[in-house]
Image (spheres, grey):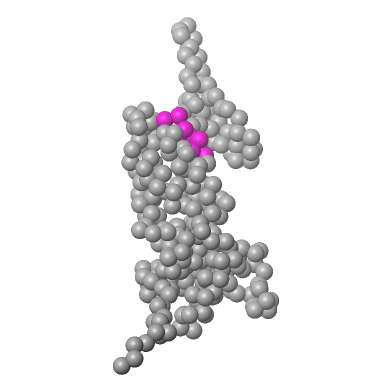
Amino acid sequence: HGFRSMPMLLSSAVNFWQSLDPVRKPIKMVYGEFNKGGNSNVHYLDGIHQSLKVAQAVRLFFEKMDGSELAQLVHTFWPSGERALSALTMRLQENRLNQIEEPLRQLSNALKHMSHPEDAPAWFNPIRLRLTEWTKNIQQNNLPLTLASLAWELRTNRLHAQAIMALDEALLEAILMARKQSSENLTAEERNKIFKEALRDLEKDLGDSLWKLHNLRNFVAHGARPDRKQQGRPVGSPSGQLPKFFQLLQPILANPERYFALQEVPDESFQVQA
């Protein structure tokens, strides 16, 4: 009976080896039995190794927001899902956060309108259900709220630097939305100018608090180098500051127009004389 454990031991060894070797070579697992005086069958046990690859790919997506391996596993029976997962992964890895709405829509549509679900292997159905739930949690009514939901998911998985950048981007997109602007039509300099003007127009304590979030974003994005205003002083644990910023932004993202909409100045250049 000891030989019956060999496929599992081999799977464990191969899985460990592949975690160290970046070159993922194809694996074939063959199990033979010896029957004296009878037929000796040979069994292919690739499915054991495949199941480990599936588990690893699923964890990589839900814990690290990297869908590259999962996309490779579904390409034969779910090409629209492969494209959506690859596009979403690329946006996140390249920090193009204000462009995640489109791949999220593509993923949602691919989940709803799968061409031939009967062609999918049995292991895919629970993954499909989990992906559907995940997408619904991230997708919100607008980009600022979607980015905030993404930031929360990143924080939950201890991807604190990415969470801070996503939350800061949510604030910037809320300002642009309230002022009827779009990142697609603005340069980085124009976006920064609108951001500074919007925070300057706020009540001082609130504006200062939002500046702290933006400074924290710059702190983690620039290798933890304080800017000149901080004069070399540490800003504290970035991950420890995230909860208060989520709480601070909750009412702002729910109604950005209340905080950031431009106030119309009445035109007093023409007055009717009595």
Query: Outermost residue, left direction?
Result: 274
How far across and how far down the image is residue 207, in percent?
49, 79
Q: Which residue is painted at 45% across and 59% down in the image?
A: 147
Q: Is residue 20 above or below residue 179?
A: above
User: Is residue 149 something one can see in this rendering?
Assistant: no
How far across and how far down the image is residue 96, in percent?
54, 54
Instruction: Inspect the magenta stretch and tell me whether residue 73 lies in it.
Output: yes
Judged left or right of residue 222, residue 164 is left
How far across and how far down the image is residue 200, in percent?
51, 79
Instruction: Inspect the magenta stretch and tell me whether residue 151 lies in it.
Output: no
How far across and how far down the image is residue 208, in percent?
52, 80
**Rendering quarter of residue 124:** top left
Q: Which residue is painted at 66% across and 72% down in the image?
A: 226
Q: Is residue 106 above or below residue 264?
A: above
Tell me the quadrant of the picture where the C terminus can be found. bottom left
Report the magenta residues as a range.
Answer: 69-77
In-front residue for pair 145/259 = 259
Q: Is residue 169 above or below residue 131?
A: below
Query: Outermost residue, bottom direction?
Result: 274
